[in-house]
Image: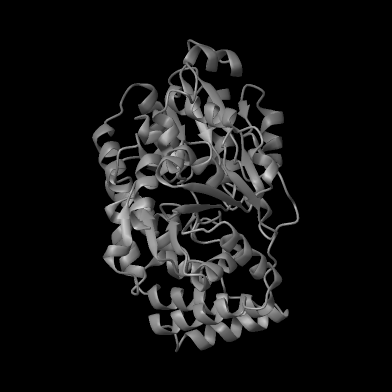
Amino acid sequence: MKNLGVVITDGVGFRNFILTSFIEESKKEFDKVIIFSCLPKSVYDEFNLDVEIFELDVYTESFKTWFYRKCKEVAHLQLHRKGNFGIQDNFNSNKTKSKSNRGYATRFILKFTNFFHSEKWILKFNSLQQKSFKNNSITKEYSKLLLDNEITDLFFTHQRPPYIAPLIFVAENNKVKTTAFIFSWDNLASKGRMAGNFDYYLVWSDLMKRELLHFYHSINESQVKVVGTPQFEPFVKPNFGYDKSMLISKFNLDVNKPILLFTCNDSSSKNDPIYLEKLAEFISTNQLAKEVNLIVRTSPVEEPERFKHIADKYKFIVWNYPDWTIKRTNHQENWSQRVPSKEDLDDLKSLLSNCDININVLSTITLDSFIFNKPVINPVFGNKANGMYDDQKFLNYHHLSKLVDSNASMIVKNEVEFLVAVNNLLQGNDDKELQRKEFLNLQIGQELEGTSKRIAQTLKAWV
């Protein structure tokens, strides 16, 4: 018997592996497929998945486990921060003056790992983290789930959340093969260590494979497979999205005007309201080459209150509030409990495929837009000198420096450049189609069509 356990960690994992055909394709490859969900079981009710679903109890991390995890993560940053701005920036974010127990512990960890941060030490910290789960009641429950369901392969749809570490520990103890899907384009080159060690790794591209082998010295090439990412697979499926006439009707747009789509990041992207208001000002003062529709899609992981003053001031803006509903609040990462609807993915695909220009602050949505061959403007006005939130620093992050080098989007650093970029595109002066295609080929190493099937077949081959 070959039984696959699929760990759905959060709302994005739900979108990538439940709203796509992944479960259906996995059922063709395995004798049995079981979902182990970090989301409430009720979120699957409307889908005819025909698989067993187990809702995992919410895991609360102990101080002991947190300490060893923090040692592991900071040591990883220490090891790789030289010459890597993104990792150095994340390392600096750990510096604290807090007088809490965790504040004192973090300062100790920063000093200790300054000397002890080799791959050998990182693996030792990981081992101590995993051993801390030994007598945890949730760990015993997880072990029973794997044994009762005779799981032979456990697939994690995200490699980083700390709350999956007890499940990794249980799989290791029960000799269950584990595979992790690398979640996003920035996770390896800019973020901290994974939640644990896995037997196998699925990556988007050859670029991501090289990054994985560079940052994780204990992983060998035979453990890694390039499969693309299901994140974008719905964009080539006819059962997602709708045509432009329905988009015009649904959002009450003017069919004769081009569509500007402004997509927001979460609240950590502090300048989003500034750029949106500046764009609205261009429109209201007739500075654009054409009259336009402006539709704003807010971040799915936050409420849109920080844009309320703009909505009140500029009534011509059309708003798309993503249909991602919080399903549980008693969780250490409440944002992860936001779950998307299929209708929201329809909206996203239709907006991207029918807009004329996408504007965002260095988000992954840049890749989404490129898939539909849409020109992208990335405004980043802030730097250390002008007193704004310094978002220009992100241009030095490893994954975004490649975007800069590709010249695939229009990166604008002030109001004048922003206005010129929008007007150039409105006047048809888009000369970056080839660069968009080349950047997509760099970041996504396989065809979008068939991604779910490819992942399922790879998992089967590794069991």
Q: Is residue 176 left or right of residue 458?
A: right
* Left or right: 66, with 454 as reference point: right
Q: Residue at x 56, y 67 (%)?
A: 165
Asked if 240 appears above or below 200 in the picture, the reply is above
Residue at the spot 68% in from the left edge and 53% down from the top edge: 334
Tell me where residue 435 appears, x and y as whole percent: 26, 39
Q: Residue furthest front?
A: 1
* Residue 248, quarter of picture: top right
In this rendered view, identify the residue nearer to me: 162 or 189. Answer: 162
Measured from the top left, where is residue 271 in percent x and y? 57, 47
Q: Quick one: 77 or 197, which is closer to the camera?
A: 197
Note whether 126 is above or below 277 in the view shown.
below
- Residue sitting at x 47%, y 37%: 24
**Residue in the image at 53% along x and 59% along y:** 150
- Point out the image quarter for the C terminus: bottom left
Tell me, yes or no, if residue 407 can be seen here.
Answer: no
Q: Position of residue 109 (x, y in %)?
A: 56, 83
| Between 368 and 291, the one nearer to me in the picture | 368
Q: How many numbered discs?
A: 0
Q: Can I make out residue 126 in this image?
A: yes
Colour scheme: one colour
| Residue 28 in the image, given as x and y percentages of width and height | 42, 40
Q: In which quarter of the image is the N terminus?
A: bottom left
**Compared to 318, does 225 lie above or below?**
below
Please tell me which residue lies in front, 166 or 278: 166
Residue 435 vertical position relative to residue 217 in the rendered view, above or below = above
